[in-house]
Amino acid sequence: MSIQHQLCEPPLGFMGSCGFENIYKLAHITGFLGFDTFYFKDSRTQELDRYPGIAFGCGLINRDFPFSDSYGPKNMVAGVTGLAPGPLSLLSQFGAQIKGRFAYCLTPRSSKRTTNIYFGDDAQISGDASRTVQVISMASNVVRYHLFLNGISVDDNRLAIDPTVFELDEKGYTKGFLIDSGSPHTSLVRAAYNPLRDAMVHYFRDKYQMQPISPSGLGFDLCYSWNSSDEIRFPSVVLHFLFKGQQQEINMVLGKNNLFEVYPEDKEFCLMILPIDDDPGLSILGAYQQTNFKILYDVNDWFLYFVPQNCLQS
């Protein structure tokens, strides 16, 4: 793709063609844009559907992606698939063919299993008597998937968090609460993270007389020493969402496996949620907290559906 092509925006050169550069906090990816033919298997006919002329980036310099069990500059991933509602995303380029719908079910990191993405009519979601499909609204006509988070609870205790810290900045997109499967962990502004951390500290202190490790060598903010023989009941975290313009809350319940990672060799466990500065203050619901949820995006109507599901069996 030439730098003069309309999809080369912003016009960034790389090795004589249109280039791109994306930064995920410390992670960095650079490469060039070109056109390729994509093939997707139809789940009903098992035949391959052909989609030629799709603009796609080839990442040649990928560094510091904290995925899997590897961290640091040597953790080089193949790239990041763009599914945001911008003009270059796969979602926009496929257009009416996939009806603005895609779904995934992220497997736990420890499983080492891959995850499929389903598009169009293959993007389906269902529950049963014990698992109800929930639906929340996303902000419409924006470049990222903003959710209307209204509060957070630890077990049944609502935290003292001003919901305005999650409001979307529609001009600069420097504030809000996004869902992003490309972010390994959830990040919360200090105004929300500190009450959550305090609640966790009080919980483990009051029930088990445990004190945080300071500092932990694992790179997370809140960790505890723990022997696998110790029986501990881990608290849950509830994210309270709103439909835009309505007051009825929809709850996403995060249990132990969405919140804590146990490191047997280090005899520690850590809260897999990280703090970020209040300014600018862009909070993100990351991949770790999305595991074992089936999640469906309906970008035509700006709805997000989710239901708890064993993704290893889906």
Image (cartoon, rainbow, N blue to C red):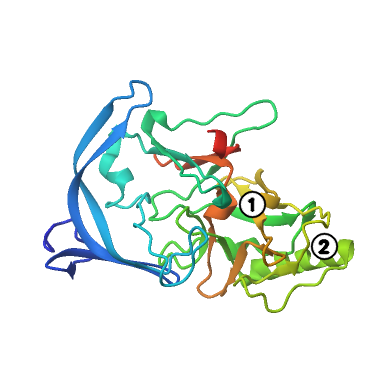
Task: Decide: is 301 above or below 3.
Answer: above
- Name which of mark 2 and mark 1 comes first in the sequence: 2
Mark identifier at residue 210: none
- x 63%, y 72%: residue: 190
> What residue did someone put label 2 on?
203
Give the residue at x 53% y 70%.
Answer: 281
Bin the neighbour count of mark 1 within 10 Å (Cα to Cα): few under 14, some 14-19, many 20 and up: many
Mark linked to residue 258: 1
Q: Secondary structure at mark 2?
A: helix
Report the front residue among 187 and 140. Answer: 187
* Residue count near mark 2 (Cα–Cα under 10 Å), binned few <14, some 14–19, many ≥20: some
Counting from the top left corner in percent of width and height, residue 56 is at: 24, 52
Is residue 218 visible to us here? yes
Would residue 62 be found to the left or right of residue 230 on screen?
Answer: left
Identified by mark 2, the residue type is Tyr
Instruction: Give left or right: position of 247 versus 13.
Output: right
Q: Distance from label 2 to label 1 (Cα)?
A: 17 Å
Mark 1 lies on a secondary structure that is: helix
Residue 148 visible, this angle: no
299 relative to 313 in the view: left or right: left
Q: x, y percentage for residue 287?
A: 52, 53
